[in-house]
Each structure stands twice: as structure tokens, then as C-alpha cells.
Image (cartoon, helix red, strand yellow):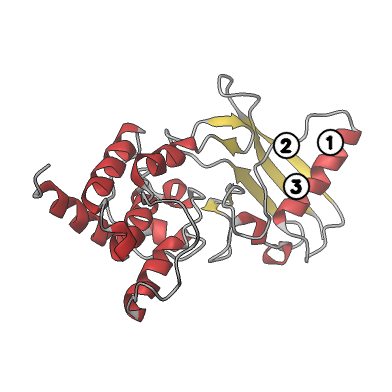
Amino acid sequence: MKVHLKIWRQKNQQEKGHFETYTVDEVNEHMSFLELLDVLNERLIKEGKDPVAFSHDCREGICGSCGMVINGRPHGPDSLIATCQLHMRQFRDGDTIVVEPFRAKAFPVLKDLVVDRSALDRILQAGGYITVNTGSAPEANSIPIPKKIAEEAFSAATCIGCGACVAACKNSSAMLFVAAKVSHLALLPQGQAERTERVKKMVKAMDKEGFGACSNTGACEAECPKGISLRHIARMNREYLRATFIAE
């Protein structure tokens, strides 16, 4: 099959970007989307041209680094996948595919499809952790946790920090990401010691980074590659409200 790629090209953060169109022949339907970009880049390098810059690492839907907007949707037209898990069988012969970076004030474009998502790291550094003494791993059953709570905590912990929720939101809100990190630690016994300060610090860091407000459109949940539920945002709001009534 043959596809036409309309790709955002931007030399650096200071210069304005633009779309460039490339045609890729002999596309195998079993190729991943990143493999398609690899094929294009090999050709561009042979022609002495600058290859398309894009982020990737594990290519297994684990690291969350491969995010890009494909035909208007973060990670592309399939559901519950990262970009690296998108395959060309989702497209038809002769399709024109528009590829651009995540668009958000807090995610400045560094080059082409690569954005700076370190804002998410700084939110985590503000409180997305538990403080424990180092040493050997504790016995798995030393702290019994009800199955329902364990499953809810795990559903939040599956967040890979890709930023698709931010790219999907019309306000560029990071609420789903922050809520997932706050929620899973608030549910577990290990997270109780810093429960109050955690939510206040992380929300403050989120606002400082310039992310927008949540207006509950649900686009974040719809585009999340791990299907993280909006109920975690509701829990984070409850945690924040609770924290404001607890004395310092």
C-alpha cells in the first residue's frame, strides 16, 4: 500500500513550523506507525535530508515517550494504545495521514514531533512518591489490602505519563495525569503518611506549569492509552478538598 504523510516540521523551539508532505510506497499493513517513520527517515538520510525527529524508546506501549497526534487524535485512530502500538492496517491504500506534535503551552515543541514533557516530571517530583526507608523489599502479604482497593489503585498506577490526556483536552489540562498519580497513592496504606501534602503540592505544581483547567469533557479518558477513568479526577478533587480542611 501507499500512504501520503503530512508531517509537522519545526527546526527548533524558536522557529515557526510548517507541514511537509511525503509519499511512502510499499507500506506493509503489519508495520507499526513508528516503523513507517523509520522507513521514511532512512530514505531522507540517503537523500541527504534532515530526518523527522520523533520520540520513542520501548516501542511496547510502556514508556509513554512516543506520543504524537495522528489525524487529529493523540496516538492515532485506534483505542487503548500508544503510538508505537498503532499498525498500518488501521489505514487504507492512498490515505493522507496528518502527523503533528502534542499541542499544549506546557509542552513546547523542541523539534518536529518532539515536545518537552518535563513539566509532568516536575509535577511528580513535587509529591508523586512515598518516603520510606531503603532496604530489602517487604514481604508481599505483610500489609493486607482489599482486592477492590488494590485493583482501583492499580488502574490508576497504569498511567505511563505520555501526555495524551493533555493533548486531547481543549484546555490542555493535566488533571487525569495528576489524578492518577494522586489517586493510587491515596488508596494504598503506604501513601497515607504524605497523603495531605502530596495532593496540595502536586496540584500547585500543575498550576505553576501552565496546564489548563478541567471542564469534564471526557476527552482525556477517551484518548488515554491505558483507559484511566475520570473517577480518579473526582477522587483527587475530594483529596484536595479534604487537605484544605486539615491544619498544617
Q: Residues within 10 Å of mark 1 (few under 14, many from 20)?
A: some
Dot 2, crowdedness within 10 Å: few (<14), some or many (≥20)?
Answer: many
User: Marks 3 and 1, Cα distance to the nearest angstrom?
Assistant: 10 Å
Residue pointed to by mark 1: 44
Does the residue at mark 2 contact the one at mark 1 (Cβ under 8 Å)? Answer: yes
Q: Secondary structure at mark 2?
A: loop
Numbered disc total:
3
How far apart in space, not on screen, are marks 2 and 1 (Cα)? 8 Å
What amino acid type is highlighted by mark number 2?
A: Val
Give SS at disc 3: helix
Disc 1 residue type? Answer: Leu
Q: Is residue 43 left or right of residue 15?
A: right
Cα separation, mark 2 vs mark 3, equals 8 Å
Label 3: few (<14), some or many (≥20) within 10 Å?
some
Are dots 2 and 3 in contact, CB under 8 Å?
yes
Q: Compare residues 125 and 50 and report the one nearer the observer.
A: 125
From the top left corner, tell me how far across and down residue 106 is, in percent: 43, 34
Q: Position of residue 17 (x, y in %)?
A: 60, 28
Q: Report the residue that reaches farthest toward the top.
A: 14
Q: Along the polypeptide, which appears first: circle 3 or circle 1?
A: 3
Q: Earlier in the sequence, mark 2 or mark 3?
A: 3
* Residue at point 58%, 52% (across, down): 71
Q: Which residue carries the number 3 mark?
A: 37
Residue 52's disc number: 2
- Mark 1 lies on a secondary structure that is helix
Taking the spot 45% from the left edge, 51% from the top edge, the residue there is 134
Disc on the earlier residue, 2 or 1: 1
- The amino acid sitting under disc 3 is Leu
